[in-house]
């Protein structure tokens, strides 16, 4: 008797794991489910199961999506208005200040808080930076060689997962966007189905620097979270 699992059995186990996990699972994590089997599937078989699931969900209300942290099953974005009715509290939008700050970090990383303030033309609220760090959407990746050695901020894999991105390459290039309003709108649209509560804006005049605007530089290198 062949001890190996059939392709259909592997697919069903992978599907059940993705449904139960409620978060992205890597290929290695999925492989670990079969570690005690006499003839466990290999990476190619897991990928084949994922490809089959992706195809089967093409015309369904949920989809298989690859994010920065692996694969997950999720509600299709266009169905979010209906699914949102299951919860009494209406999803609220992100504040403009938070989205602008996050957008600048995503497109200009690594970047210091002072550089963010120079681009925005106003001070960055400590509440906003604290929230972005607590949600693990950004992290300190180094320090600028300047007096005080200000921290350099970059986005994380959690940022990619939350905004439904496989990599930063899926963000529109700066050349395709005219200003911060368009950039923040792109981020808000990507995360619109997740129902986060608003972050209050605390804007104050910056301590220094002018009101510079982001350059439409399509060749800017985007750093990724290793």
Image (cartoon, rainbow, N blue to C red):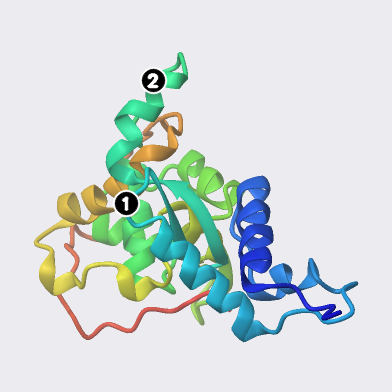
Q: Secondary structure at mark 1?
A: loop
To which quarter of the image does residue 208 belong?
A: bottom left
- Is residue 148 shown to the viewer in this render? no
Residue at (49% x, 58% y) in the render: 161
In x, y percent, where is residue 168? 38, 72
* Residue 59 image label: 1
176 with respect to 184 (left or right): left
Q: Is 99 rendered above or below residue 144?
A: above
To which quarter of the image does residue 197 belong?
A: top left
Q: Which residue is mark 2?
A: 85
Question: 142 or 40, which lies in front?
Answer: 40
Residue extending furthest toward the top: 88
User: Looking at the image, is mark 1 or mark 2 nearer the viewer?
Assistant: 1
In x, y percent, where is residue 10? 67, 68
104 with respect to 126 (left or right): left
Quadrant in which the C terminus is drawn: bottom right
Instruction: Give the class, few, some or many, for how many residues have Cα within 10 Å of label 2's Cα (few <14, many ≥20).
Output: few
State the CA–CA distance, disc 1 to disc 2: 22 Å
Question: 107 or 18, which lies in front?
Answer: 18
Residue at (63% x, 73% y) in the render: 7
| Mark found first going from the N terminus, 1 or 2 | 1
Instruction: Give the class, few, some or many, for how many residues have Cα within 10 Å of label 1's Cα (few <14, many ≥20).
Output: few
Quadrant in which the N terminus is drawn: bottom right
In x, y percent, where is residue 73? 51, 52
């Amino acid at each position: 008797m062949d001890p190996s699992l059939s392709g259909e059995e592997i697919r069903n186990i992978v599907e059940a794991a993705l449904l139960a996990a409620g978060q992205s699972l890597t290929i290695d994590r999925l492989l670990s489910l079969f570690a005690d089997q006499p003839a466990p599937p290999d990476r190619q078989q897991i990928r084949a199961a994922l490809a089959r699931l992706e195809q089967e969900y093409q015309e369904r209300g949920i989809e298989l999506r690859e994010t920065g942290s692996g694969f997950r099953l999720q509600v299709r974005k266009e169905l979010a208005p209906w699914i949102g009715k299951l919860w009494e509290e209406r999803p609220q939008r992100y504040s403009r200040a938070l989205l602008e700050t996050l957008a600048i970090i995503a497109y200009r990383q690594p970047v210091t808080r002072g550089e963010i303030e120079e681009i925005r033309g106003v001070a960055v609220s400590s509440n906003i930076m604290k929230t972005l760090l607590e949600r693990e959407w950004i992290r300190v990746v180094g320090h600028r060689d300047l007096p005080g050695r200000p921290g350099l901020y970059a986005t994380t894999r959690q940022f990619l997962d939350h905004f439904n991105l496989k990599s930063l390459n899926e963000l529109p290039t700066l050349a395709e966007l005219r200003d911060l309003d368009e950039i923040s709108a792109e981020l808000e649209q990507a995360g619109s189905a997740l129902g986060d509560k608003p972050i209050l804006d605390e804007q104050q005049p910056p301590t220094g620097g002018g009101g510079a605007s982001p350059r439409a530089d399509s060749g800017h290198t985007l750093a990724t979270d290793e």
